[in-house]
Protein backbone atom coordinates (compact mmCIF):
# COMPACT_ATOMS: atom_id res chain seq x y z
CA UNK A 1 0.00 0.00 0.00
CA UNK A 2 2.83 2.39 0.80
CA UNK A 3 4.25 1.73 -2.67
CA UNK A 4 1.02 2.89 -4.33
CA UNK A 5 0.94 6.02 -2.18
CA UNK A 6 4.48 6.86 -3.31
CA UNK A 7 3.56 6.26 -6.96
CA UNK A 8 0.48 8.49 -6.68
CA UNK A 9 2.50 11.20 -4.94
CA UNK A 10 5.20 11.12 -7.64
CA UNK A 11 2.58 11.19 -10.41
CA UNK A 12 0.89 14.24 -8.89
CA UNK A 13 4.27 15.91 -8.47
CA UNK A 14 5.16 15.33 -12.13
CA UNK A 15 1.76 16.57 -13.27
CA UNK A 16 2.15 19.76 -11.25
CA UNK A 17 5.61 20.34 -12.76
CA UNK A 18 4.51 19.77 -16.34
CA UNK A 19 1.17 21.62 -16.21
CA UNK A 20 2.62 25.05 -17.17
CA UNK A 21 4.56 23.48 -20.05
CA UNK A 22 1.49 21.64 -21.31
CA UNK A 23 -0.58 24.83 -21.13
CA UNK A 24 2.02 26.66 -23.24
CA UNK A 25 1.76 23.87 -25.82
CA UNK A 26 -2.02 24.34 -26.00
CA UNK A 27 -3.23 21.51 -23.81
CA UNK A 28 -6.24 22.56 -21.77
CA UNK A 29 -7.51 24.75 -24.61
CA UNK A 30 -8.54 21.99 -27.00
CA UNK A 31 -12.07 21.95 -28.50
CA UNK A 32 -13.45 19.31 -26.10
CA UNK A 33 -12.16 20.94 -22.91
CA UNK A 34 -15.01 22.51 -20.98
CA UNK A 35 -14.63 25.68 -18.94
CA UNK A 36 -17.68 27.20 -17.24
CA UNK A 37 -18.82 29.18 -14.21
CA UNK A 38 -21.23 27.70 -11.68
CA UNK A 39 -21.91 28.45 -8.02
CA UNK A 40 -19.54 31.42 -8.11
CA UNK A 41 -16.55 29.34 -9.19
CA UNK A 42 -14.86 28.60 -12.47
CA UNK A 43 -14.90 24.90 -13.33
CA UNK A 44 -12.62 23.20 -15.82
CA UNK A 45 -13.14 19.72 -17.29
CA UNK A 46 -10.24 18.81 -19.61
CA UNK A 47 -11.96 15.92 -21.40
CA UNK A 48 -10.09 16.08 -24.72
CA UNK A 49 -6.74 16.77 -23.09
CA UNK A 50 -7.22 13.79 -20.79
CA UNK A 51 -8.05 11.49 -23.69
CA UNK A 52 -5.08 12.71 -25.73
CA UNK A 53 -2.58 12.37 -22.87
CA UNK A 54 -3.99 8.95 -22.02
CA UNK A 55 -3.46 7.79 -25.60
CA UNK A 56 0.12 9.07 -25.56
CA UNK A 57 0.79 7.31 -22.25
CA UNK A 58 -0.68 4.11 -23.68
CA UNK A 59 1.58 4.29 -26.74
CA UNK A 60 4.63 4.91 -24.55
CA UNK A 61 3.77 1.96 -22.31
CA UNK A 62 3.51 -0.34 -25.34
CA UNK A 63 6.99 0.67 -26.53
CA UNK A 64 8.56 0.09 -23.13
Image (tube, rainbow, N blue to C red):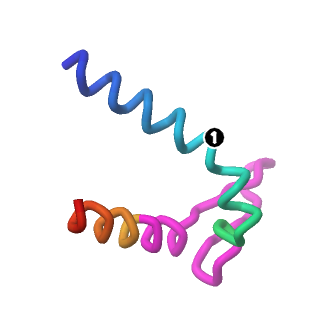
Percent across and percent down for residue 30 are 65, 78
Between 47 and 20, the residue placed more toward the observer is: 20
Q: Is residue 48 magenta?
A: yes
Residue found at the far right of this picture: 40
Side (left or right) of 64 relative to 45:
left
User: Is label 1 in a helix, a strand or a loop?
Assistant: helix
Look at the picture and state if 64 lies above or below 26: above
Q: Where, by quadrant of the figure, is residue 23 drawn?
A: bottom right
- For mark 1, what is the residue? 17
Residue found at the far top of this picture: 2
Look at the picture and state if 16 lies above or below 21: above
Neighbor class of circle 1 (other Cα within 10 Å; few <14, some 14-19, many 20+) is few
Q: How many marks?
A: 1
Q: Residue at x 34, y 23 (%)?
A: 6
Q: Residue at x 64, y 71 (%)?
A: 34
Q: Residue at x 43, y 38 (%)?
A: 11
Percent across and percent down for residue 8 are 37, 32
Residue found at the far front of this picture: 64
**Which residues, given as a range, are shown in magenta?**
29-53
Locate the N terminus by quadrant: top left
Q: Is residue 17 magenta?
A: no
Between 31 and 10, the residue placed more toward the observer is: 10
Locate the C terminus by quadrant: bottom left
Percent across and percent down for residue 2 are 24, 16
Percent across and percent down for residue 14 are 53, 40
Look at the picture and state if 5 lies above or below 8: above
Between 49 and 10, the residue placed more toward the observer is: 10
Q: Residue at x 64, y 83 (%)?
A: 31
Amino acid sequence: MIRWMIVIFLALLLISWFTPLLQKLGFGKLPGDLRFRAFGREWFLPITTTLLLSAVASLISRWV
